[in-house]
Image (tube, rainbow, N blue to C red):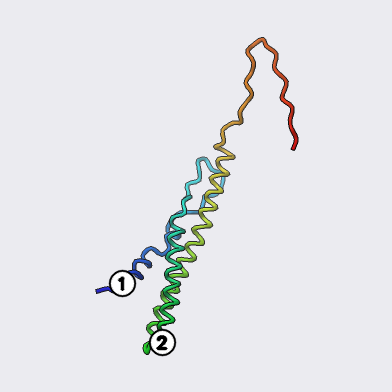
Amino acid sequence: MLGVRTTAALAALAVTGCSLLSDTAPPRRPWKTEPPCSDYYVPPVIDSLVGVTLLSGAVYTFQEARHDEEGGVGVLAALVLFSFGALAGGASVRGWLGVARCRAAQDAYAKELGAPPPPTRPQPPPGEPVPPDPPHVSR
């Protein structure tokens, strides 16, 4: 039967790298439609939490292995946890940057192609004079 620590470690390893699997980077310009990329932060948040958990587990396991008679197994386990923690940390950094680039690309698309036309002044009925432009206030 699997212990609680082993089950938790396997569950953490299963979700490591969510940001590596999702498409977060926006495509290159020009865009004909809104850039199809991931603009939500759930995968990077999960990767950050998993990374911190695995790195904390690596430190704890290494500390315990120093006081154990069979320290080699504990050190190996700490190195495995550290490796997967670093993978999750790298995935979270990629995810955070990808979401930021995606949101910037979507904002640029909205400004360039999807922005509504600027409002125009209402025109007077036919036959009436056009009022003068209002004075511009400089700041």
> Is 116 drawn above or below residue 17 in the view shown?
above
Badge 1: residue crowd in 10 Å (few <14, some 14–19, many ≥20): few
130 vs 13, left or right, is: right
* SS state under label 1: helix
> Is 107 drawn above or below residue 127 in the view shown?
below
12 vs 124, left or right, is: left
- What number is the disc on residue 4? 1
**Which amino acid, by three-letter code, is at mark 1?**
Val
Q: Quadrant of residue 135?
A: top right
> Is 106 drawn above or below residue 82 in the view shown?
above
Which residue: 49% across, 58% down?
95
Residue 53 % position (x, y): 42, 69
Picture quarter with the N terminus: bottom left
- What number is the disc on residue 113? none
| Separation of residues labelled 1 and 2 (CA atoms) | 21 Å
Q: Residue furthest left?
A: 1
121 vs 12, left or right, is: right
**Which amino acid, by three-letter code, is at mark 2?**
His
104 vs 92, left or right, is: right
Residue 17 % position (x, y): 43, 63
Residue 6 % position (x, y): 32, 73
Which residue: 61% across, 28% down?
119
- What number is the disc on residue 67? 2
- Which of the two labelled residues, at mark 1 and mark 2, occupies the earlier sequence position? 1
Residue 68 % position (x, y): 38, 87
Which residue: 38% across, 63% down?
15
Which residue: 40% across, 86% down?
72
Which of 105/51 is in front? Answer: 51
